[in-house]
Each structure stands twice: as structure tokens, then as C-alpha cells.
Image: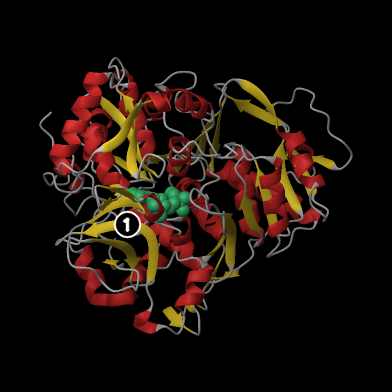
Amino acid sequence: MGTDNEPGRGDRVAPPSGFVGSANVTAGIREEFAEEGVEAWARAADLLDWDREYETVLRDDGGLEWFADGRLNAAANCLDRHLEERKNRVALRWEGATGDARTYTYLDLHREVNEAAAALRDLGVEADDVVTTYLPNVPELVVTMLACARLGALHNVVFAGFSADELAARLRRTESGYLVTCDGYYRRGNAVNQLTTADNARMAVDHAVETVVVGRLDDGVYLSDDHRRYEDLLDGHRGETVAPVARDATDPLFVIYTSGTTGEPSRVTHTTGGYLAHVAWTGHSVLDIKPTDTHWCAADAAWITGHSYMVYAPLALGATTLLYEGAPDQPAKDRLWGLVERHRVDTFYTASTAVRAFMKWGEEYPASHDLSSLRLLGMVGEPIDPRAWNWYRDHVGRRECPVVDTWWQTETGGVLVSTVPGVDDMKPGSAGPAVPGVDVAAVDREGDPVAEGDPGHLAVTTPWPGMSRSLAREAGGAGDDWLYVTSDRAVVDGDGYVTFLGREDDTVTVGNTAFGPATLESAVIETDGVAEAAVVESSERGGTAVAYVCTERGRSGDAAMRERIADHVAERLGPTARFGAIVFTPDLPKTHSGKIMRRLLGAIADGEEYGDTSALRNPETVGEIETVVDDG
Ligand code: WT7
């Protein structure tokens, strides 16, 4: 293996020349932002249609107001304004878990969103009310989100796999009086009764919750008098239109809960103008989405990734967005590549952990499909090691697509750190510089910059349009002193490129040196035959680290492999970088949004109680890991 897996230190990769010539954003963009300062963000606002022009790009009125005094409607920006030019172009393509498919043109989607908005209004939904959804990735979820946006109501999308308790907590905390759910859906080939779970949640909250039920299974699930069928409601409003409610740029568009991988989920509210401008601009400049494209963000619409880059950005830009229900390995491990081929996907965006899973499954899956339509590959969610980065570029992108590793958070609304694909060189394993108009730095606990090349907390030192309402409030009045310090550990190199080391809570100390998990994991993954790894600290094992390792298919995790991993890591990171145990496991526990649950792995290593595993996509792996943990 000739490649250097140390994140961000390998060879620079220039943007493919075939891409550069037709990129949405070209050389000079960074200079333009640097010269124009905050005014440069007018570009983002210019991608939208405003009912009333904004007065200033950024006003500090005790709280920050992006595009102050401007008024707009997000649904009108995603639908109505496209009707003139592309009413019969496809807005949304959908493939269900059981192979069923639907296609909505902009005209179709506009019609159904209007009918749904009329129906919701009839139920009593008004501007600023919170409407909760509890649906899998089905078109009705997108329709409901946009119907809320049309009415100026806030959607509160809850992941369909969450328990009744989690749904109840979100209904309660948002005082949401409306719920759109479904009778059931298919998960891994089995029908799930969603309505019973939704009803249990409703019974657990004190206020009344008006409930609309989408017929996803239509197999005789019993509906009682207080359930309203989505289809019947819409039938009562066929052909009706609802005037989009003009919202202040700073008015809320939706609420969403953070994933809670490391702590309690917290509520985040995004604005209408700043958020929409930010996601449209980054969809245009970072994901290079063009109106003629089919863009696929292979995520669940319930996460911020789905909100920003599956729904709002591609539709605001007039593209075709692809929505899929189910899992990447169901019915087979080439599901995604079949979708890319069938729908001629242009721009593809997925989770970094998904990329490592593709690598583990093997290159024959992407190789068995025609992926030549792909023009750009993106990823988000966790640090990626250079080997997986290169695998993605080679086996999915045929070395012809730029790869954007985008860093952002639920709180940031949209991408803040990424290369601009037609402009910047890529450094495998490094997310890249902050996007134009944004500044970042590695800082210490006090918020002071650390020495160049030293690890620190990643801090964002300038405001950005997609910032949540509470960050905008907090930044108000603070002037240049404000900075947003995250729990992500990172190194910023001399070129301003950011290499993420992992979350602060996941730092691993071995031989008196504190390592970001990503540094140790990259070194492990670099060993020939390793596909995925997670390294956690174990207090039980004398403060040593435990490496959980998944091998590539056809390779066995044996004593020889264990020795090679240990030798390689010591060679790479120094002789004190020794693991207390190396545990081979078929899979790593991951959350529904694709993050490795390192906290849980630490608890297993220490033989501690780890509690509820319902936040996991693959809870069965926990038992498997427990049976092998002592073999390491
Ligand atoms: C956390 C935010 C943004 C949508 C997905 C998750 C981690 C995200 C990267 C990346 C390294 C990343 C960070 C961040 N993260 N992207 N490209 N490289 N780490 O949103 O659930 O709010 O999680 O995901 O730790 O803080 P989220």
C-alpha cells in the first residue's frame, strides 16, 4: 500500500479539468468574498426571490439579522417561481423500500403542496404553529414540509425509527398540536406498525394532537375517529391553491433536534431567509447543483442533511432531487449504485461512514453499474481517512469527480468548511478551508488561537447566514469578539485547510499523548485488509485504548493481522501508541444518522451498563461485539 493515510498530509489533488470548465463557481470567488466582506453574501440572497427586498445584508440589532427587513416564502422559492420555466420538469423522484416509484414534476409537487397546505389550514394550522411529522422517506414528508413552509408554520421532522417516548418528548417540548404520520412502512422487508407507536406518543402528552395518517401500507391498519386520512383530507381540497405567507427573513422556518450522539438532543430553530440563502448558495457553490441536475442526498430527510441538501437547496435551485426509502444494502449492497444508474444521478452526497461501509462491502458493487453520470461526490458527518477518500474517488467517481468533504452541524444550517470543487485543490482526509466568507481557527479552551499546526477546538470566527436563531441572538452586540467554539478537535494547516480529529469527548489518551480518534483510526485503517475502525479509551484496561476493527471482505481478523495493525500504528504514531486490545468485529454500532457510537464502545470495553440502544441503526452489533470483546 503506497498511500499515506495520515489525514490531510498526502498529495494534493487538483480539481479535475473536465469539471473546472463548467463549475458553477470559478476561480476568484475567495478573493471576491475577501474584498467585499459581509456584503459578498448578497450572492446567496440573489439566488432567491424576495417578496420584499432586504435592507442590509447583516444588521446587528442586539441579535444578528441576516437580510434584515427582507420578506420571502421558502415554499414559493422551491416551487412557484420555477413553474414558468420548468413546470413539467421533474422536481422529485422517489424510490420506495419495496421497489415502488413515483415521479413529481414541479407542477405536480406544487399542486400537492397547495392541497396539503389547504388541508392543514383547514385543520387550524396557522403561521408559527409547529407541525410534527413522523414519516419515513416518502414524498408526503417533503410535501408536508413545504406545505408548512407555505403557511409559515414550522415543521418538526422526527425520524421514523424513533420510539414513542422520543416522539412524545418532541411533541411536548415544541407544544406541537399537529402530527402527520403513516399507518406503517417497510423496514428491512418487514412491515412496521407506525400508527400504534404514534398513538402511544400522543397518549403520553397532555395536549391534544390533531393526527393525519398517510396510507403507506394500506393493508387495513385500523383508523379511529380521531385519525384523519391524508388522502381523504387532500381529496377535499383538490385543485385549491393557498397564497404563500410572506415571512420575515429572520422568522423561523423549522425546528429540528440535534442527533444527540454525545449528549441530550437539543432544539435548533432555523430562519427563513438566512438559512434558505445559505443552503441554496452552498448547494450551488459546494455541491455544484445545476437546474438540469439530478441531485441525490442519500440520507434520511429527518436529519439536517436531508432538510438542507435533499429538500431546500436542490428545490430552491430548480433541480431534480432524488429521495429513497430503505437502506443501502437492501435488497442488496448495490442498491445505491442501481439508483445512480437508473436515474442518471449527477451530484451525490452521503455520510462519511457510508463511504467506509461501501469500501468494506467491496468495489464489485459500484463496478457492476454504470456510474458515468456522476459529476461530483460529497460527504458529511465524520472525519474521513485518506484511504476511504481515495476509494470513493476511484471506485465511485472514476477519478473524474471532485470529492467534497463538507463539515457542518445542525446548528450551522449548511456547509461551513469544504473545498470549492472547481477552485480549490483537495487534500485527502482534510475537509478543506472554510467556505468563502467564513473564517475558522483552532483555539484553546479560552478561545485563544493555538500555534499553527497544533490541535485545538474548531471555532468559527465570523457569522454566516445559515446560523441558527439562538447563535444569531448570542452573536448580537458582540462585534468581532464573538466566536463559535465547537466540540470538534481539529488542526488548521498553513494553507487554512482543516483536518478533523474527532469530537472532544472521544479523545483517546495512549502513552500520555492525547489523540483525536480520527488520527488513531486512520493509522489502523491504513493497515492492509482493514476497512473500518473505531478507537476508544478504556479506563478498566488501565487507561489504554481499545481498537475495534472491521476487516475487508475475505480477510480474517487473526493474530497476524493484530500484529500488523499494532506494528503499523507504532510506526506511524510512535512506540508509545499501543492498544490495550484489538477487537475484530463484523460491524461498528452506528446511529441512524451514520455516526459511530464511540461512547457505547467505551462502555462495552469497560464492561459498563450502556443502556438504551434504540438510537442505533444496527443494535444487533452490540451483542456481537460483547461476545468478542474479551478475545482482543
Ligand atoms: C457533527 C455535527 C451536518 C450534517 C451532519 C451531522 C461531525 C460533520 C464532518 C466532517 C468531520 C464532521 C462533527 C460535527 N462532522 N461533518 N466533514 N468531518 N466531522 O450534523 O448531527 O449536527 O453533527 O458531525 O463532529 O460537529 P450533526
Q: Which quadrant of the figure has residue 164?
A: top right
Please give left or right for residue 572 compared with residue 511 in the image. left
Please give left or right for residue 519 compared with residue 541 in the image. left
- The residue sitting at 77% across, 34% down in the picture is 196
- The residue sitting at 71% across, 61% down in the picture is 129
Question: Farthest residue toward the right?
Answer: 225
The residue closer to the viewer here, 618 or 357, is 618
The answer to whether residue 458 shows anywhere in this view is yes
- The residue sitting at 37% across, 71% down in the picture is 42
Q: Is residue 211 above or below residue 152?
A: above
Residue 506 is situated, as x and y percent measured from the top left of the image, at 38, 49
Residue 141 is situated, as x and y percent measured from the top left of the image, at 61, 43
- The residue sitting at 51% across, 58% down in the picture is 77
Q: Which quadrant of the figure has residue 154?
A: bottom right
The image's colouring method is: secondary structure
Q: Is residue 307 above or below residue 367?
A: below
The amino acid type, in three-letter code, at marker 1 is: Arg
Residue 562 is situated, as x and y percent measured from the top left of the image, at 25, 25
Please give left or right for residue 474 compared with residue 190 in the image. left
At mark 1, the secondary structure is strand
Neighbour tally class for label 1: few under 14, some 14-19, many 20 plus, Cα within 10 Å: many
The answer to whether residue 241 shows anywhere in this view is no
- What residue is shown with label 1? 489
- Quadrant for the C terminus, please: top left
Q: Is residue 392 above or below residue 13?
A: above
The residue closer to the viewer here, 569 or 357, is 569
Please give left or right for residue 506 compared with residue 528 in the image. right
- Quadrant for the N terminus, please: top left
Question: Farthest residue toward the front?
Answer: 542
